Amino acid sequence: MRQLIYKIWQKTGLLKLNKKAKWLAAMLTLFSVAPLWAQGTAAKESSYFGMPKSEFMMVMLIVLLIVAAVLVLTVSMYVVSMLNIILLKDQREKGLKPDGLLTGMWKNWMNKQNYRVALEDEEDIMLDHEYDGIRELDNHLPPWWTALFYICIVFAVVYIALYEVTGTLPNQIEEFETEMAVAAKQVEAYKKTQANNIDENSVKFVKDDATALDGGKAIFVKNCVTCHGKNAEGGIGPNLTDAYWLYGGDIKGVFKTIKYGAKNGMKAWKKDLKPEEMQNVASYILTLQGTKPANAKEPQGKKLEAKK
């Protein structure tokens, strides 16, 4: 963590600041780095401008925080300036010497940023244009407003160049697609962790999951056809395509039979198959209901309505 912050300071030139400025920069860096650091380190990342992606994003966050701080400071100065104007007006109306809120260098700087022609001198900047008795003044915008306008233009150009033209940074659509891909992997990982929690009480008939049914079919072909036949028509074991069952014909009953075996000689598969695999093969068996293979074995057990 310390090395990462040092690299960021080195790249951005923050090491040259005085102690107070370094303290402020440290706070900004910490708030910027903490959320990314908390997420842990991912696989090897691509680099931007010679920096790893994570470091580059941190630098960008610091820059954005600095820009936000400048904007807040600008608005604050504008509010102070408005309050100063109101106070000066009030002092003049009361016949007092106008002092205002500001003094010294701060006052001079604020006056420069809020420069405007005095009311008594407006005749000098009056233009010939007149509209319905209203004459136009050639009064310029305050310097702070103009500077902010230019900053927005520069920001827009840099933003478009990075996000839309060069593709250095992902735009909103790309970020959405990346997040969806990450979410899909997380869902898949979650499913894998939950797959081993399946038992005869939580098992489900995954009839709409083609991948699961294909996996169940492969398990059936490998392990079950010897006793139940290639088409589940029956052999040593009972016919699995009719409505007659010895140990239960719903998904829970079939799963339980596969898991624990049966007294007629069928082995228990709980040590050979994972819970998810047993769910898949049980689901595949239930999809064979009513297929009526030509060489089907005579019914065994009780006729049960399928409760899948």
Image: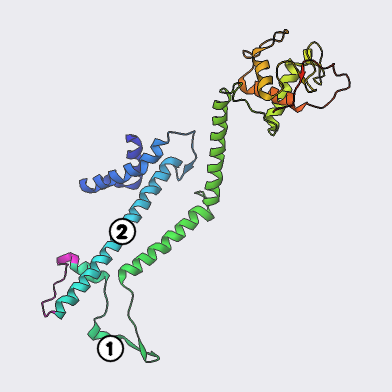
Magenta residues, as a range? Answer: 94-106
Which numbered tag is attached to residue 203? none
Whether residue 52 can be seen here: no
Q: Amino acid at mark 2?
A: Val
| Residue highlighted by disc 2 | 72
Q: Is residue 101 left or right of residue 260?
A: left
Q: Nearer the viewer, residue 23 or 301?
A: 301
Residue under circle 1? 123
Q: Position of residue 105 (x, y in %)?
A: 17, 65
Q: Which of 34 and 252 lies nearest the eye of the viewer?
A: 252
Q: Nearer the viewer, residue 185 or 119?
A: 185
Q: Give the foreground label among 2 and 1.
A: 2
Magenta stretch contains residue 249: no
Provide residue 240's location: percent of width, then percent of height: 78, 20
**Which amino acid type is shown beneath numbered disc 1?**
Glu
Give the total of numbered labels: 2
